Image: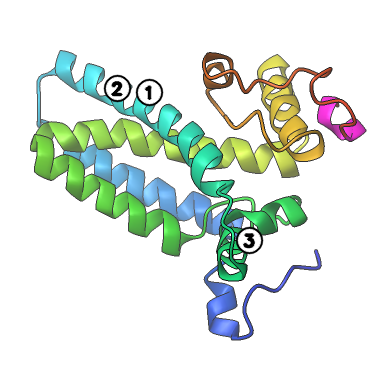
Amino acid sequence: MHPRLRLFRRDWMERLTVMPPQLFVALWVVLLALVFYASLGQVGPAAWVGLAAAGLLTWSLFEYVMHRYLFHLELPTVWGHRFVFLMHGNHHEDPNDPWRSIMPPIVSVTWSGAIWAGMALALGGAGTVLFLGFITGYVIYDAVHFACHRLPVRGRLMRTLRRHHLRHHHGREDGNYAITALFWDHVFGTYLSAKKAAGAHPRADA
């Protein structure tokens, strides 16, 4: 059993911070099927494909911005440091915890529901199709993130994604913020090559 960092004194609060991978698969198979079903017939086929693709691209940028500016937010107070540690710092402290490499449902389901509602209010039925692409991107992101830390990787693509992410963990934390759409790090100048990540743990380039 992996020794886990304890974030809260109360057991019920602690349980809200973890996500077993089996539950992740079961939960998101059901929720993606629900959103997919809700998206059917909202727009024509060509618009459906375009909106879903736009949602996927929107997620990729959201992923980068969230990781760079929210997860690595620097707050000057003790409570600020505590908040950032609860949100993401604990993952850097123990990156191989299998139940904290995936966003817990209290966060992922809550914010995804709010984003779905916002897109639907703004765009009507088209918003649901846009959200389908967006939330599919999220599920891919969490699955890739879990694989980078916990699974033996095979194939050039997964090895590239894993190397990119582990340079962020074991090299420098001020770069390689993208998990799935690595091109954003090149666009915004935060890509860490092996040289830039000097001093990285050997696993960063495994």
The secondary element bearing badge 2 is classed as helix
Q: Residues within 10 Å of mark 1 (few under 14, many from 20)?
A: some
Classify mark 3: helix, strand or loop: helix
Query: Residue 130 at what x, y percent from top left?
Result: 24, 31
Circle nearer the N terminus (1, 3): 1
The residue under the point 65% across, 73% down is 7
CB contact under 8 Å: marks 2 and 1: yes
- As for residue 79 lying within the magenta part, the answer is no
Residue identifier under label 1? 57
Q: Position of residue 46 (x, y in %)?
A: 17, 13
Q: Position of residue 40 (x, y in %)?
A: 16, 33
Residue 44 rendering spot, x and y as whole percentages: 10, 19
The outermost residue toward the front is: 76
Tell me the distance, in whole angstroms, between the alpha carbons under discs 1 and 3. 28 Å
> What amino acid type should be assigned to the residue bearing mark 3?
Phe
Of residues 97 and 72, the one drawn nearer to the viewer in this rendering: 72
Q: How many marks?
A: 3
At a point 71% along the width and 15% down the height, the residue shown is: 156
Left or right: 70 in relation to 48:
right
Dots 1, 3 in contact, CB < 8 A: no
**1 vs 3, front mark:** 3
Along the horizontal axis of the image, is 17 left or right of 139? right
Q: Say above or below: 175 vs 185.
A: below
Q: Which residue is denoted by mark 2 in the rendering?
A: 54
Q: Which residues are magenta?
A: 201-205
The residue to which callout 3 is attached is 85
2 or 122: nearer the eye? 122
Comparing 63 with 29, the one in front is 63
